[in-house]
Image (cartoon, rainbow, N blue to C red):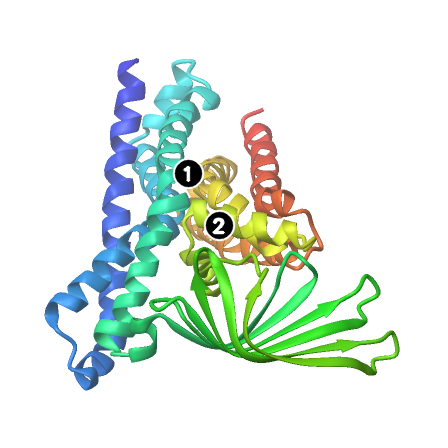
Amino acid sequence: MKVIDRYLIKSFLCSFFCCLTAFMCLYLIIDLISNTPEFVSEGAKFIDIVNYYRNMLPDMYIKLMPISTLIGIIITLNYLNKHNELMTLWASGVSSAKILMPFLLVSAIISLASIPVSMNIAPKSMAKARYIWKVNIGKQYKIKKKIWTDFSFLDVKNRIVHVGLFNAKEQSMRNIQITQYDENYNIQNTINAKEAKWINKKWMLFNGLVRVFDMEGSILKTENFKQLVSDITETPRDLLIKQAELPHLDIKLLKRRIKSLRKVKCYPYRELTELYSRISLPFSNLVMVIIAFSIMLAVGKRGKKESIGIALSIGFIYYGIAIPIILATGRNGTLKPWLAAWLATIIFALLHLRILIKARK
């Protein structure tokens, strides 16, 4: 590696880590101040507060990394511009592409290294942080016991299962209603049970009633039962996955939810968009580098202050507006999930590469 490349990389990394540290500290301070009244009212322990914020760090890193890259590049380029180092490099025959390459290389390495954080570490840590907030700090008994109430799900046999209460610790359900539909969504039969328990890898229903309907919806037959083996395929672990929020699922559980939805012929738009976005978002680093570099070249040394403002504005539009809006179109099925995850990155990268090329013609 050339001396110039090492110098550019060192300058950028110094700026990047300083910005990242500053933004994370600022985020923590603001969040701590806003949550202090609740910490006091709930009598939160110091160790619980520390563990809560410690588990938030990976998610904060993923969210703040792109903006830290943008500011770090701007600071580095302004420093080089101020001391006429960019002009010296150009006068020596070093092209803009060669100057840009070390920044892109380091940003690509940072992005690749951040994928495991985005895919697994950050979701797991956020799930732990949420648990600490709800249980240790908020002292919510139901969450601690892993009890969920009043929810429904669609199983693989085109049935809607409504659960009044699910106790993950005891692997039991209460007040269950199973509604079986035919291909035309006419009700074929219903099963109501007061209780269900997970026994020998099967759901055993207790104290219930079976109703069978004809094509017109009239009851053909009713039958009471004290005990009935159900063919519901969802395990207690599957039900836990269904109740967990998408950002808190690690890659293994996320893929399992996607697989279960496909089994019931329900296309997992939200889940696939979440999966692809965890891969694409770290690479927004590269786009931030291209945005900062293209704007600095287009505006030039005379417009140093203007270039900072323009680059920050475009970075905010890209990361704060374009990405969330396009991801929303993937979640609701307007766009393919993989396209929604990458579209903003591709558009802004191509647009600013064009600006960069024109600026140095």
Location of the N terminus by quadrant is top left
Amino acid at dot 2: Leu
The location of residue 162, given as percent across then percent down, is 58, 74
Q: Considering depth in this image, is 275 or 267 the residue closer to the camera?
A: 267
The location of residue 22, given as percent across then percent down, is 24, 53
Position of 52 relative to 298 (above/below): below
Q: For the residue carrying disc 2, how many other residues have a C-alpha within 10 Å: few (<14), some (14-19), or many (20+)?
A: many
Task: State the CA–CA distance, disc 2 to disc 1.
Answer: 48 Å
Label number found at residue 301: 1
* Rendering quarter of residue 264: bottom right
The location of residue 102, given as percent across then percent down, is 37, 24
Location of the C terminus by quadrant is top right
Position of 97 relative to 248 (above/below): above
Q: Residue drawn 61% across and 43% down?
A: 338
Q: Residue drawn 48% across and 62% down?
A: 239
Tag nearer the camera, 2 or 1 = 2
Considering every residue shown, the one lying at the far right of the view is 216
Q: Secondary structure at mark 2?
A: helix
Position of 291 relative to 359 (above/below): below
Answer whether labels 2 and 1 touch (C-beta < 8 Å).
no
Label number found at residue 254: 2
Q: Secondary structure at mark 1?
A: helix
Q: Is residue 279 left or right of residue 263?
A: left
The first of marks 2 and 1 along the sequence is: 2
Q: Residue drawn 51% across and 48% down?
A: 256
